[in-house]
Image (cartoon, rainbow, N blue to C red):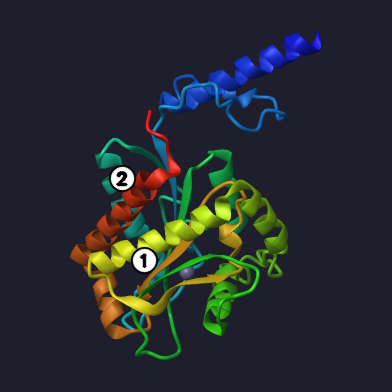
Amino acid sequence: MSDFRRRHLLAVLAGVSVLGMGSGGALAAPSKRRPKSVSKPTPAVPMDKPKLVFLDPGHGGRDPGALGSRGTQEKTVVLAIARDLRRELLAGNRYRVLLSRTTDSFVPLRERVARAQAARADLFLSLHADAHSDRDVRGASVYTLSEEATDREAAALAARENRAGASLSGMRLSEQPDNVAQTLVAMSQRGTVNDSRRLADTVVATFARNGVRLLPRTHRQAGFAVLTSPEIPAALVELGYLSNAQDEKLLTVRQHQLALARALRASVDAYFGTGATRKA
Ligand code: ZN
């Protein structure tokens, strides 16, 4: 095959795969045969598909995450809110939504990242609810990836989240991100670092507007393994502290779960409405 013919064929295949993603999977089969050398859809193809939002309810299965004094499990609370958020996002017909897990199942952190990358998500939101040794600490906080943690608490949180299920599944902390520096270089080349910061700041602003209680210095940074997709703007949201009695109670109240889901949907709307996308 001549070089020209091969290039032409690759361009056609890339076009087919883009159309396949945009039409609800009806043309999905050819995308499986997409050659590896074509990693990005060609800009020449008109992009009129809804953005793909990847939601990552933390923990699951044998890894319950943080535990509240009334027995609330982080994995249960964040899955409920992720499902609410999926419903909220789908209601406006503006997004496609994928969840890293839809049931109480264990999914390793790297698998979550891999699934979002394979699906070519436009946005990655990891949902959590932490515990703190000081039971008075309460409020939501938002995290993005960095090599150096902004503070000791953010570093400790990242270490806890990166350990998710590692000891339970017999892994020797294999979830520790060993490539944060490398990922950050790739992320800044693609503008993903700035987009992730903007995403986090948008969530903070939207939470504040919607009366969601926030930690001081709400947007923090640390080396979270689950935020290491070079191409996907990503943030990890701690929705509150299960170690705090009031937060624990709120996080189990349906009305509050729905309010958090709506505030997160408004964040996603605001993020995509401010220049990250070009209107078709
Ligand atoms: Zn967590």
State whether residue 208 is above or below residue 4.
below
Q: Residue at x 33, y 64 (%)?
A: 205
127 sits to left or right of 4? left
Q: Which residue corresponds to mark 1?
A: 204
Task: Name, please, the residue furthest toward the front.
Answer: 275
Q: Secondary structure at mark 1?
A: helix
Q: Work out whether residue 67 can be spotted.
A: no
How far apart, in angstroms, are the residues tagged by discs 1 and 2? 18 Å
**Amino acid on which disc 1 is placed:** Val
Mark 2 = which residue? 89
View extreme (left): residue: 255
In the figure, 245 relative to 77: above or below? below
Tell me what residue is drawn at x 75 percent, y 11 percent. Answer: 4
Quadrant placement of the N terminus = top right
Q: Name the quadrant containing residue 221.
A: bottom right
Q: Quadrant of the C terminus?
A: top left
The x and y percentages for residue 85 are: 31, 52
Circle 2: residue type: Leu
- Whole-percent x, y for residue 219 in the image: 45, 70
What residue is rendered at 61% in x and 62% in y?
A: 225
Residue 120's disc is none
Instruction: Tell me if 133 is positioned left or right of 33 in this view.
Output: left
Residue count near mark 1 (Cα–Cα under 10 Å), binned few <14, some 14–19, many ≥20? many
Q: Position of residue 16 (x, y in %)?
A: 55, 18
